[in-house]
Image: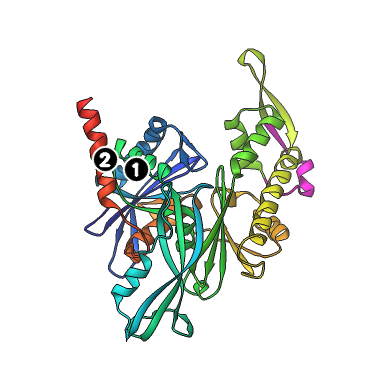
């Protein structure tokens, strides 16, 4: 929602839903006036698999944010993620004919959506690099004279079925879709500051069921990779290895878990609830080293896959000397040093905290905060819009509910 400088955003993940409502000022700054957070059900690896369960989670998060902000929202910017969200760099040219390049020429270039694909829809069309005739590396060609204007576009696409189900789910929650943003793109918008935007950056979002890698060329979103592993894999390993429930395993990981086994772990003991027959629960005493010996192999596996994905991408290993890590997995003790060792790069974990009406919000809200920046600063100039289609979906759903 963007009405009277109020923006509402919704981050739907595999394990949590975040909603933020912000008042945005003319200078680009903003103030969070409402925030809601809820465990997410009905979503698997970024894809809605159970609309009714997802609806309940979204409703809780949205209503919590609305109550805090004392406003009622009608539409939201929402994220999309998962292995089916893909990027590709294409080259598009436009004959200018020796005249001055106008804003309309840029709009025409960015509206290019590649070959027609009935199963995919373009979410973002982002200019990475312009060239004017034989001149390369042009940042803003408007006002220049040229015979031909070229641009390398980063096209971000997602399956239409995934997009349609996302919008239908929001319609069930009585919410319109103001815009759709790729999660890793939003994370980078928030995490990369103006100084860092002058160099190449890699952003890694350690999520619940997936880990996303975003490549930013001089601060411009230029590519992404998604791997189907995340924090939930670690949680399940703990639950299996210690014969405890998923809920207990998640709590153990959060309170006592670390990415490596330290010298003192053998002498530090913790109690683990163990599931037994007839629903009886017993307590076993283990050392922290037992816990972290379960965690370390899985986090090593995830980071190794990340390293290989970076190496096998269109971007060389020397693309960036630094990696920014965010997401729920970035809170794991020792992850910064362990990641630096595996990835062989300088690691930065930004412990950014915004104040939401007295409630501090951290890395779990990175994507949501990035969407606020996207909604206000980009003016959706890189977003392919289809409001008529989305409105039609909502109206169709309402007609079915009222007439069948």
Residue shown at 53%/61% (left/top)? 223
Q: Where is residue 293 drawn, in percent x and y?
A: 75, 41
Residue 50 colored magenta? no
Location of residue 149 with respect to 270 vertically, above or below: below
Residue 301, which numbered label?
A: none
Residue shown at 76%/47% (left/top)? 261
User: The residue tagged with tag 1: helix, strand or loop?
Assistant: helix
Query: On the rendered structure, is 180 left or right of 250?
Result: left
Query: On the rendered structure, is 97 left or right of 344?
Result: left
Colour scheme shown: rainbow
Q: Where is residue 117 drawn, in percent x and y?
A: 43, 51
Location of residue 232 with respect to 2 vertically, above or below: above
Separation of marks 1 and 2 at Cα, in angstroms: 8 Å
Looking at marks 1 and 2 on the same chain, the residue that comes earlier in the sequence is marked by 1
Q: Are marks 1 and 2 in contact (CB under 8 Å)?
A: yes
Location of residue 116 with respect to 247 vertically, above or below: below
Front-lying residue, 198 or 392:
392
Q: Quarter of the image holding residue 62?
A: top left
Front-lying residue, 307 or 191:
307
Location of residue 316 with respect to 181 vertically, above or below: below
What's drawn in magenta, residue-wise?
258-271
| Residue 102 seen from this side | yes
Front-lying residue, 210 or 340:
210
Where is mark 1, residue-wise?
Answer: 167
Residue shown at 34%/73% (left/top)? 106
Q: Residue furthest top?
A: 278
Q: Where is residue 137 drawn, in percent x and y?
A: 49, 80
Where is mark 2, residue-wise?
Answer: 394
């Amino acid at each position: 929602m963007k009405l009277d400088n109020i923006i509402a955003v919704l981050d739907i993940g595999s394990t949590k839903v975040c909603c933020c409502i912000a008042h945005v000022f003319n200078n680009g700054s903003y103030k969070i006036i409402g925030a809601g957070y809820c465990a997410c059900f009905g979503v698997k690896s970024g894809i809605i698999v159970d609309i009714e369960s997802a609806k309940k989670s979204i409703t809780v998060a949205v209503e919590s944010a609305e109550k805090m902000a004392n406003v009622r929202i009608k539409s939201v910017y929402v994220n999309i993620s998962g292995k089916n969200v893909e990027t590709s760099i294409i080259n598009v040219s436009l004959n200018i004919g020796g005249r001055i390049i106008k804003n309309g020429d840029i709009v025409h270039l960015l509206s290019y959506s590649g070959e027609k694909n009935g199963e995919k829809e373009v979410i973002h069309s982002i200019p990475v690099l312009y060239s004017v005739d034989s001149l390369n590396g042009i940042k803003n060609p408007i006002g220049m004279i040229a015979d031909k204007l070229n641009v390398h576009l980063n096209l971000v696409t997602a399956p239409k079925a995934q997009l349609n189900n996302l919008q239908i789910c929001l319609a069930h929650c009585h919410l319109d879709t103001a815009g759709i943003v790729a999660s890793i793109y939003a994370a980078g918008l928030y995490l990369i500051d103006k100084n860092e935007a002058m160099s190449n950056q890699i952003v890694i979002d350690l999520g619940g069921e997936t880990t996303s890698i975003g490549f930013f060329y001089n601060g411009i979103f230029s590519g992404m990779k998604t791997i189907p592993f995340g924090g939930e894999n670690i949680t399940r390993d703990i639950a299996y290895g210690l014969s405890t429930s998923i809920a207990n395993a998640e709590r153990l990981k959060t309170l006592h878990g670390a990415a490596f086994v330290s010298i003192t772990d053998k002498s530090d003991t913790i109690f683990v609830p163990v599931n037994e027959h007839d629903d009886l629960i017993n307590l076993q005493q283990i050392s922290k080293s037992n816990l972290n010996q379960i965690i370390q192999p899985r986090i090593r596996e995830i980071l190794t896959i990340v390293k290989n994905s970076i190496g096998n991408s269109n971007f060389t290993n020397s693309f960036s000397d630094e990696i920014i890590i965010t997401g729920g997995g970035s809170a794991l003790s020792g992850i910064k040093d362990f990641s630096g060792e595996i990835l062989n790069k300088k690691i930065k974990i930004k412990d950014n905290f915004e104040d939401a009406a007295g409630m501090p919000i951290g890395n779990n809200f990175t994507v949501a905060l990035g969407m606020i920046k996207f909604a206000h600063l980009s003016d959706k100039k890189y977003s392919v819009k289809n409001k008529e289609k989305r409105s039609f979906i909502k109206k169709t759903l309402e007609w079915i509910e009222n007439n069948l």
